[in-house]
Image: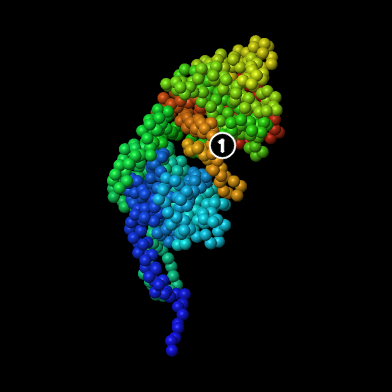
Amino acid sequence: MEIYIPISSKELSQRKIEEYQKMSKIINWGRCNPVRFCETFFGLKLIDYQAYCFMRTWAVQYALWAECRGAGKDTLAAAYFMTRLLLIPDYSLYISSNTYAQSVESFNKLRDIALKRIPSFASATDVFAREVDKTGSNSETGFLQAPTCKFRLYNNSKMEALSSNLEAIRGKRGAVWLNETAWKTAEELAVVENYANVDTSFSTSTEKVQYYKPQQMPLQILYTSSVGDVTYPFFDKYKTFYKKMLVGNSNYFCFDMNAYDILYHSSIDGEPIKSHLTEDQIKKAIEEDPDNADVELFNKFRKGGGHNAVVTMDELIRNSSNRKPLLYNDTGKKKFVFTYDPARNFDGSVLSIFEVIDDKEVGYKLRFVNCVSMVDTNSKNKTPLPMPAQLEIIKDLMIKYNGERSAEWENIEFYIDAGSGGGGISAVADQLMEDWVDKFGKKHRGIIDPNHKQYETARKKYTNAMPIVHLVDPQGYKKIMYDAVSKMVKLNLIEFANYDKKDYILLPNKDGSFDKVDLTQEEQIALANMEIAKLQLSYMCRYDTSNGGVTYELAKDKKNFHDDAAYTLAEGAYALAILRREDLLKKPKRDSSFDPSQFVMARQPQIRKI
């Protein structure tokens, strides 16, 4: 007689034991050789500098990667965390970026690698994708996109993208991937860094018998970013991590990779390879914008305007969001403010366009929707276009933004710098008074400043010209305008756009998911010019003079930098201040958040309510 005793749920069959032994050998081998594990099981071949960075990061608790644009830090981080999540059970990882859209993009990079959607990884496998738990999920792949981007593996490790709402993400525990950290504030970092302030080996039990337990992997914080401003915490962490690594602290790793390192030192298994960055690309970036190239390509931290800054980069980031530029009046009912700083020879010539928004809660505000640089791309020194060509661009934009089925020019107010150097009066305003015919043969009314002293006679002659022009004297109004832009941005009354130099952006849906929206070349140029305007504004400083006055100039180490786009932003803020002041004066109760006495001017221009 044979007696069969069934195996309980706590006992394992010999076959199960052998399978677990094989698995444990693979897992332990992978933990000791994570780079080889990544290449063997995921089919991802790393460049030597990536393999070095990967391996040095593996064993530390605090790591920082300062890498130039194009270095592939998101791709390397995705491969790194795929390996870590698969080899460490019960491991929670959270992604945090400046915006939720950036966190989603980082999440999607890992997902696309796992699902073999990136052509450059020709030998990629689906090993990681098969380990994603699909049970109880409405996603065929197990990668959830809405309302939160997240997934869970069969070993109970998980990954989640965090929103940018600090109050909504407090109190979590796990490892953290802080991406695009250069522009994160100290408060934002503090909230997420506390996730890792837990000893993973700590536990309590009511059992009398104490058992030896395997040591747990500590929670790790990885900071990845191109460099930014010295006033942000990323700069201090960069210095601290480097010093600690230099003195031999095995818990810290700091990695710095610039464009020339990639160009001249790319290799695989010790054999030199062709870099994915080219020397022509690097030279072109240096020629077009040396200051930006220092930051984006060579990891030189930007000093910004310091404590004298009119508007800090933090304030600009707070008021920025992912959106497409508006290249025309898409509804025909929107109102716009044009601000123009003309130039012909030595300076830049820039036209900025703002949409006027009548918000129910805060009143009038502006949305920065387009920025046009009147540059002659064929000239050697990239000088401005001839004035006739600039005027043709302006007329074309006026038609686009006024909109169809609208009276001329009821949807536009036009502010022009009247300084003698740029020819704002003689070369621009004088030429726009007469009626003109567009390229389709349609006649349009001219435009004129109804209050400027030089047009006292012209107003009687050009009676058909619309009074929408406001000539602004920089000598008398520069302080007022920069005071206005400082106040308007601090009050969150000017909206800006984000742009990371890609040919697409991620736009949120109502359900929390994101759509990838491709950008046309014209939209990319507009967003790039808008980013330049924000950068110039961050360099503008307020200095007190010895006689008790105030001057506004670029930071002392940015004297060779242009400020034309920043000036147009100040013009826009000035127009908004006037609009809000007139609106508040008509109300029985004034909004205490705005002090119109700050904008008392010697000559108060009359402006139509738009």
Looking at the rendered image, the quarter that the N terminus falls into is: bottom left
In the depicted structure, whether residue 265 falls above or below residue 162: above
Residue 443 image offset from top left, x and y in percent:
67, 18
In the depicted structure, whether residue 532 falls above or below residue 469: below
Left or right, residue 450 beside residue 503: right
Residue 155 location, quadrant: bottom left
Left or right, residue 123 beside residue 531: left
Name the kind of residue labelled 1 in the image. Answer: Lys
Depth order, front residue of 598/36: 36
Residue 464 image offset from top left, x and y in percent:
69, 16
Q: Does residue 238 appear in the picture of this structure?
A: yes
Residue 126 image offset from top left, x and y in percent:
45, 55
The residue located at (59%, 46%) in the rendering is 509
Disc 1 marks which residue?
324
Depth order, front residue of 429/75: 75
Q: Residue furthest front?
A: 122
The residue located at (43%, 68%) in the rendering is 204
Depth order, front residue of 140/27: 140
The residue located at (41%, 63%) in the rendering is 202
The residue located at (36%, 33%) in the rendering is 279
Q: Does residue 198 appear in the picture of this structure?
A: no
User: Dot 1 surroundings within 10 Å: few (below 14), some, or many (20 or more)?
Assistant: many
In the structure shown, which secondary structural element does the residue marked by tag 1 occupy? loop
Residue 6 image offset from top left, x and y in percent:
46, 80
In the depicted structure, whether residue 199 falls above or below residue 392: below
